[in-house]
Image (cartoon, rainbow, N blue to C red):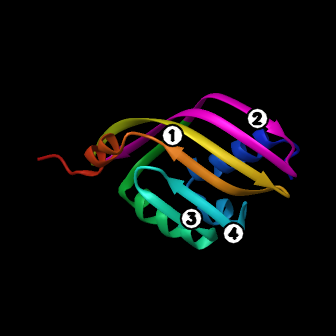
């Protein structure tokens, strides 16, 4: 188990980059809220699965880089803020999506994951080239 909020989030992101959505889903609470601010919310481990399986299925490559990260508290009760570059290979091209993320952690589990990003950049990446 991770000792710090930073470690919880880094482990979670590592699982996502590895496309291990099932293991990532074990790191979120039953009342987990996943809020892609410009896109909408999903709830619980199944909401995480449903959202990411569909999107990751479009991707032939995934690479997320944490640019900056800060946290407060502990793995028992903490908050993490990070700035990331989420890179996705979709339709044969790599797209970089600048993201600001917030994670809240309780009892070693992620209870909130909220990401802020430009919706138009993501939708453009998801649109097949002409």
Q: Distance of mark 2 from mark 3, alpha carbons?
A: 23 Å
Q: Which residue is mark 3?
A: 48
Frontmost of labels 3 and 1 is 3
Membership of 54 in magenta stretch:
no
Residue at figure coordinates x 63%, y 43% from the top left: 102
View extreme (left): residue? 130
Please report contact status of discs 2 and 4: CB closer than 8 Å, yes or no: no
Q: State left or right for residue 101 relative to residue 89.
A: right
Q: Which residue is mark 2?
A: 71
Frontmost of labels 4 and 3 is 4
Q: Distance of mark 2 from mark 1, alpha carbons?
A: 22 Å
Q: Which residue is mark 1?
A: 63
Q: Depth check: give the residue in front, 114 or 61.
A: 114
Membership of 77 in magenta stretch:
yes
Q: Which residue is mark 4?
A: 31
Q: Residues within 10 Å of mark 2 (few under 14, many from 20)?
A: some
Q: State left or right for residue 40 relative to residue 111.
A: left
Give residue 119's position: percent from left, percent from top. 35, 45
Residue at figure coordinates x 68%, y 30% from the top left: 69
Numbered-mark total: 4
């Amino acid at each position: 188990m991770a000792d710090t909020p930073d470690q919880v989030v880094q482990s979670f992101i590592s699982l996502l980059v590895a496309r291990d959505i099932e293991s990532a889903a074990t790191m979120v609470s039953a009342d987990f809220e996943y809020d892609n601010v410009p896109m909408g919310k999903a709830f619980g481990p199944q909401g995480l699965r449903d959202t990411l399986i569909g999107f990751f299925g479009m991707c032939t490559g995934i690479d997320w880089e944490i640019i900056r990260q800060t946290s407060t508290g502990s793995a028992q009760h903490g908050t993490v803020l990070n700035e990331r570059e989420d890179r996705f290979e979709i339709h044969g091209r790599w797209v970089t999506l600048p993201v600001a993320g917030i994670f809240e952690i309780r009892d070693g589990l992620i209870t909130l994951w909220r990401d802020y990003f430009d919706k138009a950049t993501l939708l453009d990446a998801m649109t097949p080239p002409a």
